[in-house]
Image: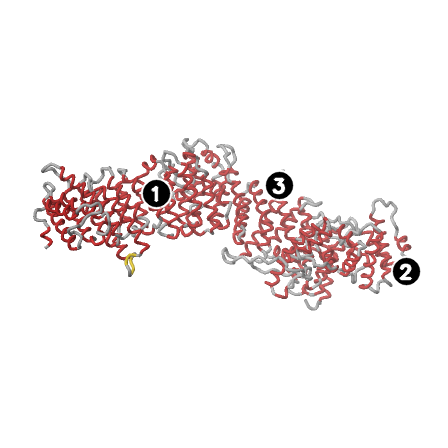
Amino acid sequence: VPPYGSASQVEVLQFLSALIAMDDDPEGGDGEDVCVLGLSLAQTAIEAGKDGPLQEKGAISVVQRELFQALLENADVPNLLVLSHACSLVVGLYVNLREWLRFQVAAFVQCVLMKIAEGKGATYEQQEVALECLVELSRHPTFMADMYANLDCAMDCPDVFSGIANLLSRNTFPVNSPLATTHLLSLQGLLAIVQGIQQRLGPEGGVPPLPEAETDPAEYSDGLWRPVRAEDGYEAWVAGVLVKKQLKKRLAIGADHFNRDYKKGLEFLQGIKLLPTPLEPVAVAELLRHCPGLNKNVIGELLGSPKEFDVAVLGEFVKLFDFKGHPLDMALRVYLESFFLPGEAQKIARILEVFADRYHMQNPHTMANPDAVYVLSYSLLMLHTDQHNAQVKKKMTLDEFVRNNRKINDGEDLPREVLTELFENIRRHEIRIKDEGSHYEMSAAQWAEAVRRSQEPGERLVATQAGPHFGREMFAMIWGPTIAATSVVFDHAEDEAVLQEALGGFLAVARIATHYGVEEVVDNLVISLCKFTALLSDRLPAPGSGGGSEETKAILAIVTVFCIANRHGDAIRSGWRNIVDCIVRLHRLGLLPPQVRELDEVQDLAKVVRRPQRQNSQSRSLLSSVSSQLSSLMSMEKGTREVVPDPEEAEARARVQDYVNSCRIEELFTDSKFLQNESLEQLIRALIWAAGDPPAGLVLSEEAEEAALLCLDLLLGTTIRNRDRILLLWPLIHSHLAAIISAASGEATPLLERAVFGLLRLCQRLVPYKEGIAGELLRALQLLLRLDARVAELLAERMTGEVLYLLKGCAGLIRDGAAWRTIGFLLTLASHHPEACPIGLEALECAASPDSGGISAASFRPLLEASMAFVTSQVEVQQELPARALKVVQALTRKLYDWAAKELRDETGVKEESQAILENLWWGVLESLKGFSCDAREAVRVRACALLSETAAAGDTIAVGPESWLKMLDDVLIPQAEALLSELNSSKAGEDQGGAGEAASTLVWTVSQLIVAHLGALRVLPSFPVTWMRAVGCLESASTANDEAELNAKGVEAMKGLLVVGAKEGLLVKGWTSSDGVNMWDATWKKAHAVSPNLSPEILN
């Protein structure tokens, strides 16, 4: 702020840094108080200058170098105020200057916060302060994303985000101790990270997940180690750093190979395109310089090798260091801390020679030539060994060091002050030559390198923006530790706020996992929660056990599980088993809401008596009202259900019932139509698994049968709800129903009944909706044919009612012959059952009605056979049943007319491929009817003969051939007419013939008319004379029947017509003889004369 300029800002920051560093603190002074003052003033300065003054280059440089160095060196002093103010200052610096402090913030987090939080030489109070700072940083909207994108995704940087997550996870677990503040702070940090990822997703269901980045390089790129440029746009930068992260993961695998055998490791890295083929020294050098995780001993072995390629690698390796402006000891530190210096003198000499050349080239005015640099470097190494080797008792003095380095600078002495400074630096600060450092420690060389990189434009922190970027990758790293840690805290916690915080974390994890489609996470979460429900354990607490808190956790876990299932069911796979198991246990306890047990789709199938359920009472606070009473409630599962609960237990049950009702368990099934295919399939599999394998005879305990019934109801209801995906579910459903029905014996158990009627209900609901699978669904009805006869008899009435409902709704959609055969079998079964018979006949009439469209080539014979079964049924229910059944046969016959006249006809007549089918069906009707002409029931015989006549006439429309006509006359009509006439002629005068005369009249007239109509085609058949004589004989018997005037007249009229047409067609002529020599002319006229004296050859004139 004027009149003060940037120079004054720099001076102020330097002054504050000096206060924090306690540089002027005498032994026993008040340095820590001064440090606290400096930290407080620094916070004020940072806050005041955040909008402008601090953005000056000089001020930024002081913050990067002196201020953070002071923080790193002094933040971990025992004084809690120092640590607390240092943490607050770093948070403020990150918020206001994060672009410039990428490496500094990371260093503070790793070397101060994580070191203290893990308890490395720190007090418990210091741990708390460090963890509180990590929690505060974790709650910042961008901190974790910034760390992940700028450090974890950088090829040559440590993994700060994953380090924090792993530390918090480890610290959450109490080891042989109760939960402490550090455990809860660690959990808060973990959940803060999860909540941050969730907040970056935006509103639920609002932002789709970003696609995963491509990670497999087609070939090696020399830009592998270069940072991704933010100048190309934020989206391009995000994609670039994500690719880098994937490459970094693969590089870690390569580093492991390298550490075991560097030659094979280099070959492996070539194979995954992270090194070029053939190998180039510069590429190997970059790997050695930048790759994290390489063993420094192996690097030193390679760099010290005398092989030509390895020497070239050493030359390229040293070029990757920037020694410009560094004192020699600092340059040597930076160089030697990147590998383990080998022990052989020749290798050391070679390594130091290239170092000396590089250092002198970048700092030409510090010494006369590279040789001077080499000699002094070697001398510094010897001094380092002398000063820091415990076995050396007599340490080298400054004078000895100066004396050892006389005349090394091209014959001249180096200034004593230069040598003195080098001596003191080496004496005070050890060079980390061996690979013995901790990732919580930072050497002076590493700090110098961090400062150097932070001042390069391409190494600045790129601020992450709001949005789901990096969420998938961060979540993949943290979900496992988070679920494990949260579960441990939930298990040990007793405080309501802690329990609620843990449950909130579970829900956040579930939402993120669903957003990114990581089903494994939700399954793991469901399984973990279900372990807390006492419902999943056979050892339920007994009354008065004092385990109120544990039982409350069980209910909390149940509520949370079903909340996750309702919200994120799409992401559940194997977890459905645990959820269904919970439902079954709730059912056993009598806590399952009735709307779950009685889904609308299957509500009327249940015939099992249900236990009465208590109405819900007014809900209260879960933790305050349930914990002390739930134990006695749960004990009711084991053998105490008959005991009348006292008022306290009843009140507890009512309250728990409220909480279970609030879970909306029924919505898992009613809304299952919104589940993705894979999740729905797993839900169905879980229900089948929970039901168990049906034992032989379906002999189950009461508990097992209740579970199986519940699961079957849910299975059927869910299937009907998902009728549009029946192709996906049907194999599983069919297999389960088949297992139940096949396992049944001679007893109609509740499970068998539910399976039988559930199968029929599925067909009723799904066939009209899904015609494409109707055949497969209906073929499953063949399972009913496996029923024991006794069971079928017991279930006949209800099965027939379900078949009636099925035919009313979709008779015209059933095209499968096997399905119709099964339906026909069930209707036939009904015809012999008193209660089922009327229902079965109604079903038969429904199928045959013109409006239903149920008559088809596939259904014709099954319906015909079922109709005949009702005609022959001995069940005395309703007298009109046989007549109604014959009406169904008439409908079938008329359908033959329709098919032949319309549907199966083209311009040339009945289609050739259809004619054989129609004729076969026609014969089926004739064969079925012919046995009823002599039935003792008058209505049946009269109706049957009329149908025979009508059916026979249909042969004209079907266009049957002469052979079929002749066979029909010989095998059906004439034998039936002969039987009736024989009965009439053998009866006594005045005896009631039960309609035999009317029936015979119908058949006799039909025979004569058919012969007249088809005489031209029949006369050429060799066996026709025999048929002719049988027909004439029938007419003779008809004309002479006792007490049947109408039949007598019909016989005379039919005989006259037959003679006239026979003569007209040139058949009935003198000389007509049969193949066996019978004179047909004489035989015919002899019969005609017996019919009537007036019938003689003269009538032909």
From the top left corner, tell me how far across and down residue 658 is, in percent: 43, 42
Of circles 1 and 3, which is in front? 1
Scheme of image coloration: secondary structure
Task: Find the distance from the CA under tag 1 to the CA under tag 2.
Answer: 108 Å
Residue 281 seen in the current view = yes
**Crowd band around label 3 with a 10 angstrom C-alpha radius: few (<14), some (14–19), many (20+):** some
- Say whether disc 1 or disc 2 marks the residue closer to the N-terminus: 2
Per the image, label 1 sits on a secondary structure element best described as helix
Query: Observer-nearest residue: 933 or 649?
Result: 933
Label count reads 3
Q: Which residue is mark 3?
A: 174
Q: Residue at x 24, y 40 (%)?
A: 872
From the top left corner, tell me how far across and down residue 544 is, in percent: 49, 32
From the top left corner, tell me how far across and down residue 235 is, in percent: 59, 63
Q: Which residue is mark 1?
A: 604
Q: Residue at x 22, y 49 (%)?
A: 952
Q: Which residue is mark 2?
A: 413
Quadrant of the rendering where the C terminus is positioned: bottom left
